[in-house]
Amino acid sequence: MAARLSLWASPIKTSRLTTPRSFAPTFQCPSQIYRTADGWVYIACLTQKFWDLLCQKLDRPDLPADPRFETNNLRLEHRDELTKILDAVLMQHPTVFWTERLSGVIPYAPVLDIGQALENPFVTQNGKLIQVPYDRDPQRKEVTFIAPPFSFDGDLPVDYTLPPRFSQDSRDILVDLGYSEQEIEDLRRTKVIC
């Protein structure tokens, strides 16, 4: 089970967001992250209606009539120019301002760093973090992991424990394979096993 756990989770460490841009689809614009005065936001204008609403909320009613940005295809052709314009507008205020202004109006979300995401109520109140007892360091009593994104009838698919220490289970495995205590001791004495 330990190997499976490592596929889903690794011990959580906090860090700051350093990626300047994320994936921007080649079929929709604007639909990517943009800079704010203090961070990043994700905006996805999936329809012309959302584009028009975004421009209203940004106090830029001129943008929908701009020949470079009238349609999605034109916005895609001029994505770099549009990104610079939107960054300039969004950088005039902090993320919280834009969250209050745009949430529920268009597809929008603030981009959180790892620490902020782990403190988000959705994560903290919905069992998205798992505390695993930890006995290998006197300074730590537990390790926090991110839960897998699925469960079965509300139960997580594995028992969350740390993997065994190096060679901790060697004797049990060798006994299961039919080795005698004397053979196991010989292997240990000759340093074939620890």
Image (cartoon, helix red, strand yellow):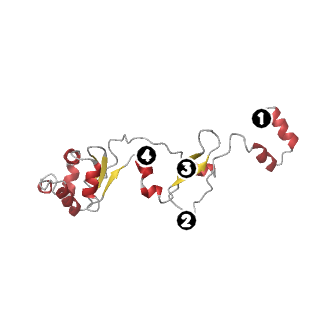
Task: Of the two numbered discs 3 and 1 on the same chain, state the one appearing first in sequence.
Answer: 3
Q: Report the quarter where the C terminus lies.
A: top right
Few, some or many C-alpha atoms within 10 Å of disc 4 (few <14, some 14-19, many ≥20)? some
Who is closer to the viewer here, 102 or 69?
Answer: 102
SS at badge 3: helix
Q: How many marks?
A: 4
Q: Residue at x 47, y 55 (%)?
A: 124
Task: Of the two numbered discs 2 and 3 on the same chain, state the one appearing first in sequence.
Answer: 3
- How far apart, in angstroms, are the residues tagged by discs 3 and 1? 30 Å
Few, some or many C-alpha atoms within 10 Å of disc 2 (few <14, some 14-19, many ≥20)? few
Q: Position of residue 121 (x, y in %)?
A: 43, 56
Which of the 4 quarters of the picture holds residue 39?
top left
- Residue type at tag 4: Gly
Task: Of the two numbered discs 4 and 3 on the same chain, state the one appearing first in sequence.
Answer: 3
The residue identified by callout 3 is: 7
- Residue type at tag 1: Val
Instruction: Indicate left or right for 73 with 116 as reference.
Output: left
The residue identified by callout 4 is: 115
SS at badge 1: loop
The residue identified by callout 2 is: 154
- Residue type at tag 2: Gly
Instruction: Indicate left or right for 110 with 134 as reference.
Output: left
- Residue type at tag 3: Leu
The residue identified by callout 1 is: 192
Which of the 4 quarters of the picture holds residue 182?
top right
